[in-house]
Amino acid sequence: MTNPFDEMANRPKIAAAFVKAQRAFSPAIKDAVNPHFKNRYADLASCVNAVIDALNDNGIALIQRNHYCDGGVIVETVFLHESGESLSGGQLHVAAERANAQGYGSALTYARRYALMSACGIAPEDDDGNAASQPVTAEQAANIKALAEEVGKPIGEICQFFGVKKAEQIPAAKYHGIIKTLEKKREGAA
């Protein structure tokens, strides 16, 4: 079995770029709702959005390969650096609950989310406990309001989404995700 630290030592360019990228990763925002359990979770798009800009800004492409297996899916997350060096996050097997397209599709999405979070060292935002109950600071609320106005997003819609009446009540754990989403909207409008 290959020692992962030996593998990194033999790929210094991607190792250095990955460390820089990881400093800029965001938490995966829990912005989807499971219809069966009514709980929030970070969907695949949220997981990708948490890391893709930082990876790309550091010359790293994200690839998720599918490997053959019976009764489920195997996903391997691979990072490819512009130098040609690559790094594998390992393989993750997820069994399909049903042997049909829906079952395999669900297993694939699940495997991609968890393989990506594991390979990148990210986690869904913490929406439990004390951290979730703390509101944004006055400065953070002002930043959200200013950026929302700049991109034409009514602050009331943002507040409604988070179940609060005013920006100063938005949970602090949501701040970075809101700012990142609004900045992407601003970039798309430019």
Image (cartoon, helix red, strand yellow):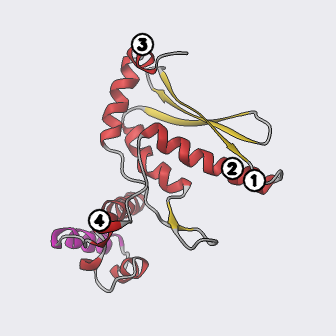
Q: Residue at x 67, y 47 (%)?
A: 108
Tell me the kind of residue under disc 4.
Answer: Ala
Q: Residues within 10 Å of mark 4 (few under 14, many from 20)?
A: few
Tell me the kind of residue under disc 2.
Answer: Ala
Residue 103 image offset from top left, x and y in percent: 76, 54
Asked if marks 1 and 4 touch (Cβ < 8 Å), the reply is no
Asked if marks 1 and 2 touch (Cβ < 8 Å), the reply is yes
Q: Nearer the viewer, mark 2 or mark 3?
A: 2
In which quadrant is the N terminus drawn?
Answer: top right
Mark 1 / mark 4, whichever is N-terminal: 1
Tell me the kind of residue under disc 1.
Answer: Glu
- Residue stretch rendered in magenta on the structure: 138-151
Q: Nearer the viewer, mark 1 or mark 2?
A: 1
The furthest residue to the left:
139
Q: CA distance from mark 4 to mark 2?
A: 31 Å
Q: CA distance from mark 1 to mark 4?
A: 34 Å
